[in-house]
Amino acid sequence: MARIAVIGAGMGAMGAAARLAVAGHRVAVYERTETYGGAVRRFERDGFGFDTGPGLLMVPAVYRDLFIKTGKEPLEACVDLVQVDPSARHVFADGTEVSLPNASRAGVVAALDEALGAGAGARWGDFLIRARETWDRTRRPLLEEPLWPNWQVLAGREPYPAVPHKRLLRTRRAGTLAEVGAWELRDPRLVALLESHALAYGLDPGTSPANAAVLPYMEHAFGTWYVRGGIRELARAVYERCLARKVEFHFGVEVTGILEKDGRAAGLELADRTMEEADFVVSGVAPGVLDRLMRGTAVRAEGVGEVAPQRRAASRLTVLLALRGGRPEGTVHRTVVHAEDRETELDALFGGNGGMATRPTVTVLRPDDPALVPDAGHEAITLTSTLPTRPEEDRPEVFERQAADMIAVAERAVPDLRDRLLWHEVRTPADIAEATGAAGGAVPAPALAAAEGRLLHASNSTAVSGLFTVGGWSHPGGGLPHAGMSGALVAGLILEGPDFQGSQ
């Protein structure tokens, strides 16, 4: 039985802890804050409840696998998991609206043809077929296997089977997501639909590789899911599964250093100078935090071509709205209100100035969940928008102005919003930084192939024997499904050693 110390109680870290504990190891988790879940948090006030991190779950099979492998009770016995249908309503810049059925290609094609005109659905449906081929090519190396030692193969090859496009007597194929939209979809509303999936992860469609097509494909193929009570309930269930497997949790405990002995991770130093010995250390913190804990020892081997850890990513602004009046019957759970000037929005976010977009793309979540409101005469709505990481000295009034812009955008989806508004709360990048330790409130994106490896994440193994990394800042990157996958990979590497070839 090995002693395993886990730094952080994020979703990936807890997933690894549960898998390692059920294998018979003694696992202890040390969390700097007073609760579990990482970015998966909850805000409560006056009987209202809100998710302040992810509000929906994609690829629930990742967490079904975790619960099957760590106990007798399946995921559905621990949380009330429901499919969201329609998957999303989209309100485009020209006022066109379309509601897309959940996990139905034929239904999506028909809805797009009716809303956008004949042929629009077929172009999107053909795109989904190409996206599926991309998924089939990248699923195992990017999600289910440890990062290949020869990861440069993933960095140089574009797996998206782009349609040949003739331009100026030359035949070209889309290399970026923006080119996929412009050359293959050929409708500004379909382009906005495609690019909104990248924007939600803080990715610039103009520089994101074409294989970012897997992002809308994953949502289409595996459906969009909600956990009754909020996604925080999923974090609770994973935490309780850890407790059932005898994982020890130490909250409000700051790790100040990682101990080394003979070139191997040997435990942790805590803020009170306590030393905790361990045979393995699993780090679920951001790269900059891990560097400080290692006190000069290189976490990643230099000169051997290892992927450098990502340190730059976008952040999010979240606005929580408490409304008088119940949720109208037939209200769609998720609405994406697209920016009226998409090019200006993208330039503000990714053009180099690091500014906030005026009237940005806003995701509006309106869950039908009595657990989130004081009574049937009220409604809880969450607005989210992407923005660059922000310096800690940003003043509250900067975010209040942006929140007012987001509320104005949301009125395109909820016309009576201001008349019903009781109060609002703004969750800023500083709140994300406090919960996760990521500088500027950065939110990691999922791993993608091609693009010279810019969107790959550093491997779960490190240059220090016995030290592994888990969560959104390491392979396979950010997002709830990816965090769960990282936990499975780390557990496999510890249990089976460097020859571990991935989950089956």
Image (cartoon, helix red, strand yellow):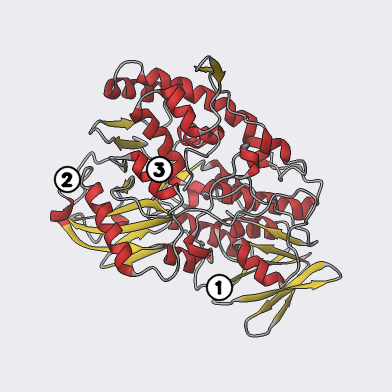
Q: Amino acid at mark 3?
A: Val
Q: CA distance from mark 3 to mark 2?
A: 27 Å
| Residue matched to label 1 | 32
Quarter of the image where the C terminus is located:
top right
In the figure, 238 relative to 205: above or below?
below
Report the residue at 70% width, 53% height from top. 460
| Residue matched to label 3 | 82
Left or right of 301? Residue 222 is left
Report the residue at 42% width, 66% height from top. 431
Report the residue at 34% width, 35% height from top. 86
Q: Residues within 10 Å of mark 3 (few under 14, many from 20)?
A: few
Q: Can see residue 7?
A: no
Left or right of 270? Residue 327 is left
Q: Earlier in the sequence, mark 2 or mark 1?
A: 1
* Residue most extreme to the front: 168
- Image location (x, y in percent) of residue 170: 55, 17
The front one of 63 and 476 is 476
The front one of 164 and 375 is 164
Label 2 sits on a secondary structure element that is loop
Q: Can see residue 251?
A: yes
The circle on residue 415 is 2
Q: Earlier in the sequence, mark 3 or mark 2?
A: 3
* Residue most extreme to the left: 419
The front one of 268 and 361 is 361
The front one of 436 and 248 is 436
